[in-house]
Image: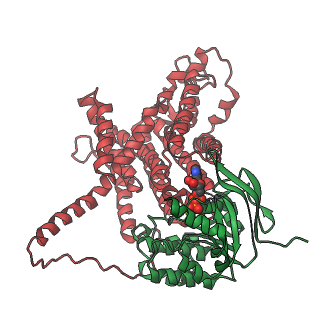
Amino acid sequence: MSATFRKTEIILLGILAFIALVLLPALNAWTPPESFFHISNFTINLYGKYLSYAVLAISVDLLWGFTGLLSLGQCLFFSLGGYAFGMYLALKVGKLGQYKQDLPDFMVFLGYKELPAHWEPFRHFWFAASASALVPALVALAFGYLAFRAKIRGVYFSILTQALTYAGCLMFFQNSFMFGGNNGLTDFKFVLGHDIRNAATQRGLYIATGALLFLTYIFCRWLTQSKFGKIQRAVRDSENRVLFSGYAAPNYKLFVFVIAAAIAGLAGALYVPQVGIINPSEMATDKSLEAIVWVAVGGRGTLVGPVVGAFAVNALKSWATRAFPDLWLIILGGMFTLVVLFMPKGLVGLPGQLYSLWQKISRRRTNAPPDGDTSFPEAPSDHQNPNPES
Amino acid sequence: MPKDFILSAEGVTKSFDGFKAIDDLSFYLDEGELRTIIGPNGAGKSTFLDLITGKTRPDIGKIEFKGTPITKRSEYQIYRMGIGRKFQTPSVFANHTVYDNILLGLEGRRGVWSTLLFGRTSTEQRDRIYDILKTINLAHKANEQAGTLAYGQKQWLEIGMLLAQNPQLLLIDEPAAGMTDEETVKTGELILSLAGKHTIIVIEHDMVFVRQLNSKVTVLHQGHVLREGTLDEVRNDERVIEVYLGRKKNV
Ligand SMILES: Nc1ncnc2c1ncn2[C@@H]1O[C@H](COP(=O)(O)OP(=O)(O)O)[C@@H](O)[C@H]1O
Ligand SMILES: [Mg+2]
């Protein structure tokens, strides 16, 4: 374990966690609204949403950047988690709904007198919270088992995950399983007994999402640094060699796929009470594609990249959808193209990219004199470090 | 009483789009034997290794390893039975360090849970990795990305991964390709040092190298065994001469 985290990283993580989990909520709660340091309820709510997107982005990158699986199904798992928790929230509305009855409004509207059996256990918070991770994980397990056994790879895997997402989307749209149809679940009132519109409740949800991001990061850091993580990246680079080295690559992929689904589900569960609604449009293909753009922009194959990307792209989106409401998809597509072409390592790779560019330029300049007393000797080719893991 | 071969292939045929890459091939290998397979390009040598290692499945025929049929097993199951392979074009983990390549090749448990929870490298394992790196002359490159190695060094790294695996049966496809004469001789010495402890099949073109190995030779031609014997017997066989020289005449 000690080799997993470097000291500077721990300090940096600690500072960031302090700012996000303690400082911002404190400024929101205890500074007067007119103060320069005040963080508004709107901002807390917005950042809370971004934090859950960041968790989703890490799950996308765990698949795409670390394992080479470009899954277009992560928003399905995100939504499944959201629905699981949304069902809990919908049941806690109680008699305060439009129809003043114990059932969720849409059921009353459809003439239901009793709660369907599969809704019953979602009255309990811990059941709903666990289900928000376990339901996506089980769907991923079943789907992944079949797909990886059948050796479905590359673009075929992407298409298949998209088909799965589409099927899920249709299923929720048609309301045949009583999940609220195209309106989804909304008008929530309480979470764990607290008024959901209350600033303190929203602050609590924000902190919980921040904590989830923090734990997700630490878990994924540990995972990707372990020997498992080395095999995971080997699967990405050369799956055949992994198979011929005796590792059951399908099992490794399945494991990551299930873990990523559970993480996405938890992110969805915390997203829903902060935006106040979950409906099938969260499963539409463009949502998965957006998450992929976050990862590409932030920096694929790193854990910081997806977080940076989720914040940067969504901040841009908040601004652009107000300034140029019709152009957002074009901006998004253009950004993706530019990043893929010119910034393969994304925003987090930009400093390194610029540094090597600068080195190249300055080397050309210093090499210009003919006697070439270059101050850039080649790095010694055999730097010896007997302990490559530290 | 039939003899117990470590590897036996009987009546194996494999065609690609109607073209028979392997045609009614039968092949037997004794435990501890070193065998060299030669044959013109396209004779089906690599395809034969594909069939043994589970990369492709035969249309008909059976292949047994230590008496167990293996044609229905997956690549990693066959590996775990004790068969290791070096590919014709070097196949290493390009984005991993040289050290990690050997580490991933190292024998030991390979399940998801064991690499997740018990994946720490012990001191003995680390020493073993460095021993192997010294054997293949790559200790000074331990921390470099395998993708940056020269072609011949990648060949050696892949052989190193085989050494780490310590399999019973080694399948080595054209190990000397891309190596200097000196490196080729060293590779030959390395293979000879493994012979006896392991059963080995080497595929090679380079006749100097084949002579150095000094083993029984199987000549493959159009997916079929043309001749087996010592190198001198094989070289003086009329059909073998015809296959090699006849092709040259036509070119
Ligand atoms: N996967 C494949 N698909 C189609 N043809 C193949 C495949 N693998 C091998 N072949 C063909 O089988 C023949 C034998 O190839 P190979 O075993 O690589 O020969 P070599 O003896 O040179 O190693 C070649 O004609 C090759 O094109
Ligand atoms: Mg070949």
Left or right: B218 in relation to A27: right
Q: Is residue A28 above or below residue B205?
A: above
Extreme residue in the left direction: A369
- Number of numbered discs overlaid on the protein picture: 0
Q: Position of residue A339 (x, y in %)?
A: 31, 46
Scheme by which the image is coloured: by chain
Q: Quadrant of residue B246?
A: bottom right
The residue drawn where x is 46% and y is 33% is: A285
The residue drawn where x is 60% and y is 20% is: A107
Q: Position of residue B58 (x, y in %)?
A: 70, 53
Q: Position of residue A22 (x, y in %)?
A: 37, 54
Asked if residue B112 shows in the view, the reply is no
Q: Give the camera-side residue of A236 and A301.
A: A236
Q: Quadrant of residue A358?
A: bottom left
Q: Give the camera-side residue of B193 and A210.
A: B193
The residue drawn where x is 67% and y is 56% is: B22
Left or right: A27 in relation to A282: left
Q: Is residue A293 above or below residue B222?
A: above
Colour chain B appears in:
green
The residue drawn where x is 28% and y is 29% is: A327
Asked if residue A227 shows in the view, the reply is yes
Q: Give the camera-side residue of B187 and A367.
A: B187
Q: Is residue B24 above or below residue A192?
A: below
- The quadrant of the rendering that contains the C terminus of chain A is bottom left
Left or right: A45 in relation to A153: left
Q: Quadrant of residue B53?
A: bottom right
Colour chain A appears in:
red
